Amino acid sequence: MISVNDLRTGLTLEIEGEIYSVVDFLHVKPGKGAAFVRTKLKNIRTGTTQERTFRAGERVARAHIETKQMQYLYSSGSDYFFMDTNTYDQVALQADDLGDAPKYLLENMTIGIQFYQGQAVGVDLPTTVNLKVVQTEPGFRGDTAQGATKPATLETGITVQVPLFVEQDDVIKVDTRTGEYLSRA
């Protein structure tokens, strides 16, 4: 158990059977009445955020989340298979457990998978990934004014907007948080 007075950003808590990560918190001590802590919590399983207020000194359960480095092996239907890089144990995860991660997964890629009581609850992707452009329309000379963009389909199947100078078979860097083009790799 941890006091809400000791909260800090990134801490994981277990509240009413759900696991939350502290996104933001504020200790409020009004001139009249008892102090309280206003928090913004993100549900690790669903990704939704909620605001919650606690009385100062109230205690909540801390959730201990273990992050394991795992290598992506392959997918079969909606199952994605990963191997623990330390123990070589294989784990199958459903697409729902991975969130947006399948859009950026390449075979043999190593990512961090978060486990709570033996169950996968989240994925730590690298901030950027390098992906190959498999299909895009050619850019035309003179079409470069004002940073024009065009759609490009990448090797994982996602479509991102890229500048006109990007051609098919180019390798580009994509931000996994926003899904946007960053630069050529």
Image (cartoon, grey):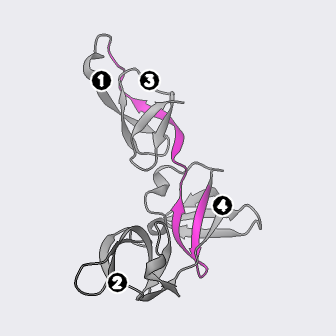
Tell me the distance, in whole angstroms, between the alpha carbons under discs 2 and 1: 48 Å
Looking at the image, the residue that sits furthest to the top is: 142
The secondary structure that dominates the magenta segment is: strand
Q: Nearer the viewer, mark 3 or mark 1?
A: 1
- Residue 67 placement (x, y as % from top left): 62, 67
Question: Which residue carries the number 1 mark?
Answer: 147
> In the displayed structure, would residue 120 be above or below residue 167?
below
Q: What amino acid is found at the position of numbered circle 2 in the picture?
A: Phe
Kindly indicate the quadrant of the structure image that contains residue 32.
bottom left
Question: Which residue carries the number 3 mark?
Answer: 167
Q: Secondary structure at mark 1?
A: helix
Label 3 or label 1, whichever comes before in sequence order: 1
Q: Nearer the viewer, mark 4 or mark 3?
A: 4
Q: Residue at x 55, y 69 (%)?
A: 93
Q: Residue at x 46, y 66 (%)?
A: 9
Q: What amino acid is found at the position of numbered circle 4 in the picture?
A: Met
| Marks 3 and 1 close (CB-CB < 8 Å) | no
- Residue 75 placement (x, y as % from top left): 56, 59
> In the displayed structure, would residue 7 be above or below residue 80?
below
Q: Nearer the viewer, mark 2 or mark 3?
A: 2
Closest to the observer: 77 or 34? Answer: 34
Tell me the distance, in whole angstroms, between the alpha carbons under discs 4 and 3: 32 Å
Q: Is residue 87 left or right of residue 91?
A: right
Q: Which residues are magenta?
A: 111-140
Question: Which residue carries the number 2 mark?
Answer: 54
Q: What amino acid is found at the position of numbered circle 3 in the picture?
A: Glu
Q: Secondary structure at mark 2?
A: strand
Tell me the distance, in whole angstroms, between the alpha carbons under discs 1 and 4: 38 Å
Question: Which residue carries the number 4 mark?
Answer: 70
